Image: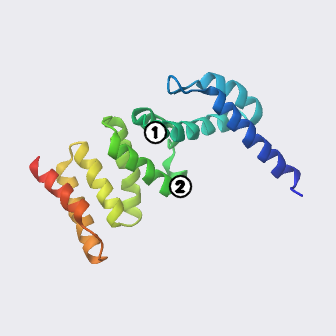
Amino acid sequence: VLPEQNLVQFENTIKLSDMAERAINKDKKSINDAQFLSEAEKLIGKEAAMEYLQAVKLNYYTSVADYENFANAAIQYYAHPETANPDELMKAATVISEHSKNTVALKKAAEWVESSVMKGETEENTYLLAKLYSKIGKHDLAKDFAETSRRLSTSAGQDTSKADQLLKEINKK
């Protein structure tokens, strides 16, 4: 038997999922924020409803390959990156680096990855930071981090082809 609090939480999750489904217009590939929030706020409050909506947007926009709306939703959802799951931030930054041309989103993703790098350099986070720096025109920094990624990959016995390819692209600029 589930404690009452767990049961309420479970029921709320189902209700929120249904609300999100009703707010999604699959033909227009959009989400009706006002519709979702008007229902969800009654159930879980304004702040939690906004947070849930942003999470829905991240998942939905990725599923329909709407990466510009994904980038905007990610910026809102991760407005306080210090409290976010670092792996989720890296995934969002990766999607933005691969699909967005929005300079604001690219710079914000670079900030998220910078904080990851400051906690510890890995071949993945230094590569991603190099890629983001390259896209926002910081070519000297991009080159430095791509070289760091290649060095870390080599020392870990990992494939260096992504870093090598990025270095070739950077050197052409």
Identified at 34% across, 38% down, the residue is 100
Q: Residues within 10 Å of mark 1 (few under 14, many from 20)?
A: some
Color encoding of the figure: rainbow
SS label for mark 1: helix
Mark before the other along the chain sequence, 1 or 2: 1
Within the image, what quadrant is residue 39 found in? top right
Rendering coords of residue 133 (x, y %): 26, 48
Residue 4 has which mark?
none
Q: Is residue 136 left or right of residue 124?
A: left
Estimate how packed mark 2 is, as few (under 14), some (14 to 19) or many (20 or more) residues with alpha carbons within 10 Å: few
Residue at position x 82%, y 45% from top?
8
* Residue 126 percent coordinates (x, y): 31, 60
Residue at 79% x, 42% y is: 11
Of the 4 image quadrants, the one containing the N terminus is: bottom right
Q: Which residue is mark 2?
A: 85
Of all residues shown, which one is farthest toward the left?
A: 172
**For residue 45, what is the image quadrant?**
top right
State the residue in front, 136 or 118. 136
83 or 126: which is nearer to us? 126
Q: Residue at x 20, y 64 (%)?
A: 147
Vertical side of 152 occupied by 54: above or below: above
Percent position of residue 35, x then y: 65, 23
Q: Amino acid at mark 1?
A: Ile
* Image x and y of residue 69, in percent: 44, 32
Residue 75 disc label: 1
- Tag 1 and tag 2, C-beta contact below 8 Å: no
